[in-house]
């Protein structure tokens, strides 16, 4: 891993300061996809940012997805390519989106991350910016624990962890039910999944995308 920093500098010079932000997500019913698109909008506001939207592979069969009422939603995601491991190496910043499952990331995201051992062995993600956004069914359904536990994987990869600072004032409001915390943007879906991200939650996602891309752009200079 000792030559990884020289390699990063070399790659940056070769790309002539174009900064790549990869937004990598899993979404079952569309809530995280909506947040991912808002994150992407925010990242695109940063000069020199190239924003790439990708999804992790689905592990559930079409039969199970249909029984869960998610098959048609999943098919609507087909225009977004499934990520390739090489794309993580090429990115300067990676912003991960996952729904909460029992206070942790979903199984699809965990399985994908478990496939990145080769990248870890190469030190391929060392020095890259990493950030996380999430969703949960209820206001106290584990949004913070999901993001914080996700950070452990990013730190093992040597990534620079970035959250959602209090300069996003929308996370301090008490006039409405809303996700978002210092750890990352988030949305509340409702127990039946009927609640889509609010404008405040989408604003938090946009802020996070811009904030992460801004930091990454400074690091590659």
Image (spheres, rainbow, N blue to C red):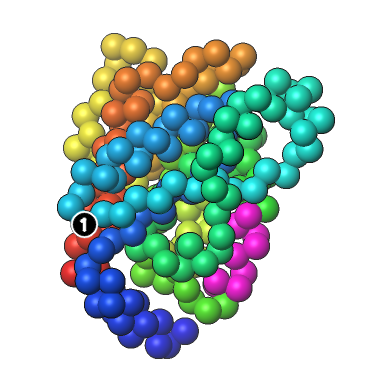
User: Who's the residue at 36% across and 69% down the image?
Assistant: 127
Quarter of the figure that contains the C terminus: bottom left
Residue at image point 65% right, 60% down? 114
- Residue 114 highlighted magenta (yes or no): yes
Task: Examine the rendered structure and indicate whether residue 178 appears above or below residue 27.
Answer: above
Q: Is residue 18 left or right of residue 25?
A: left
Give the residues drawn in magenta, as a range: 112-120
Who's the residue at 47% across and 73% down the image?
124
The x, y position of residue 138, in whole percent, is: 53, 20
- Answer yes or no: is residue 26 visible: yes
Q: Nearer the viewer, residue 148 or 79?
A: 79
The image position of residue 84, as x and y in percent, is: 56, 60
In reply to whether residue 177 is colored magenta, the answer given is no
Side (left or right) of 120 relative to 44: right
**Residue farthest front in this picture:** 79
Q: Is residue 178 left or right of residue 153?
A: left
Does the magenta stretch mainly form a helix, a strand or a loop? Answer: helix
């Amino acid at each position: 891993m000792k030559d990884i920093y020289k390699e990063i500098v070399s790659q940056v010079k070769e790309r002539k300061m174009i900064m790549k932000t990869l937004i990598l997500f899993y979404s079952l019913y569309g809530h995280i996809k909506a947040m991912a698109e808002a994150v992407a909008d925010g990242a695109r506001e940063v000069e020199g940012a190239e924003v790439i939207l990708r999804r992790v592979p689905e592990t559930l069969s079409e039969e199970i997805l249909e029984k869960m009422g998610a098959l048609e939603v999943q098919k609507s995601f087909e225009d977004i390519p499934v990520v390739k491991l090489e794309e993580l190496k090429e990115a300067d910043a990676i912003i991960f989106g996952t729904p909460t499952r029992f206070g942790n990331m979903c199984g699809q995201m965990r399985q994908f991350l478990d496939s990145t051992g080769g990248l870890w062995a190469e030190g391929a993600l060392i020095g890259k910016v990493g950030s996380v956004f999430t969703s949960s069914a209820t206001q106290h359904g584990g949004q913070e624990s999901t993001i914080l536990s996700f950070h452990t994987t990013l730190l093992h990869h040597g990534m620079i962890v970035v959250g959602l600072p209090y300069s996003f004032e929308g996370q301090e409001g008490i006039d409405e039910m809303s996700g978002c915390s210092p750890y990352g943007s988030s949305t509340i879906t409702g127990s039946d999944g009927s609640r889509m991200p609010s404008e405040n939650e989408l604003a938090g996602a946009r802020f996070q995308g811009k904030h992460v891309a801004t930091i990454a752009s400074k690091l590659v200079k």
